[in-house]
Amino acid sequence: MDIQIIFESILNNWHVILLFFTVAVLYSSVGFGGGSSYLAILALTGIVFTQIRATALLCNIVVVSGNVFLFHRQQKVNWKKITPLVLLSIPLAFLGGKIKISQQFFFILLGFTLLFAAITMWLSRRIIASNEINANSKPLKNGVFGGVIGFISGMVGIGGGIFLAPLLHLTNWDTPKKIAATASVFILVNSIAGLVGQYSNPSFIIDWNLTSILLITVLIGGQIGSRISNTYLTPIQLKKATAILIAFVSIRILIKYLF
């Protein structure tokens, strides 16, 4: 890549780069990728909508890969329980990413998805739930939930952890740390599947000059966040602040594309 083009991209998008770095630090500290916030930021920049999804998913992959590695080393990943969740979500995330949708439909779907995510984040108080574990977790039920979330995630361009984690906490699926590890794995596999689905679509487009800068940014931010954990912000504080931002963006998008 041309050095001058990279320099111009940094100057023109410094505010986006700074926001991506902040999101990566905060979200990786609690096991998330930040896809919903990346989408919210990109939705206000005027970037081509077909590129928004791919960029958000790539950033997701970079951030949560480090989380999954650390959680695996800490033996927090229960692969046996995770398998039913991702069995349907992976092919359906691929299908969701492959489906060609119009710009208006994408932003309407994105608006409602972000609004639902914001409400879920605001109401979810069990992110720091007790260590009670539901021993009656049903694989078939988990598979259906994972599949639905995976399909929506692939279409919109997120990993789905923002929907999955509150659901798992509300059902006492496992301990909070293992749920964070599960969300990271879920986000990673669905982001990869969704991205592959998008790549197979003829309308796939991405500006590597800007995207490469954002990927380096979230890589650094994700590594910092995964190591500081929740030292400065509790998961609840992070979720409340982010919910307000995402709700604001979702309402702006819906007003623009519905009315």
Image (cartoon, rainbow, N blue to C red):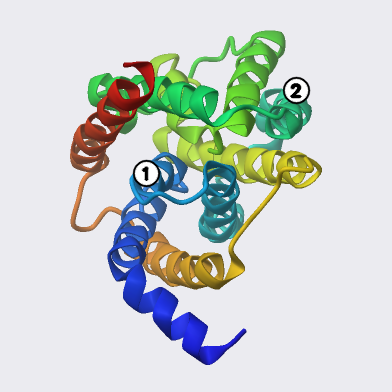
Percent from the top left, x then y, of residue 256?
32, 26
Q: Is residue 37 left or right of residue 139?
A: left
Q: Which mark is residue 177?
A: none
Percent from the top left, x then y, of residue 111?
39, 25
Q: Quadrant of residue 118?
A: top left
> At 43% across and 41% down in the image, what residue appears?
177
Q: Quadrant of residue 255?
A: top left
Which of 201/34 is in front? Answer: 201
Instruction: State which quarter of the image contains the C terminus.
Output: top left
**Amino acid bearing label 1:** Ser
- Residue 181 against residue 67 in the figure, above or below: above
Residue placed under numbered mark 1 in the picture: 37
Residue placed under numbered mark 2 in the picture: 88
Q: Is residue 233 left or right of residue 90?
A: left
> At 60% across and 67% down in the image, what residue appears?
208
Instruction: State which quarter of the image contains the N terminus.
Output: bottom right
Which of 204/124 is in front? Answer: 204
Q: Distance from label 2 to label 1 (Cα)?
A: 25 Å
Q: Earlier in the sequence, mark 2 or mark 1?
A: 1
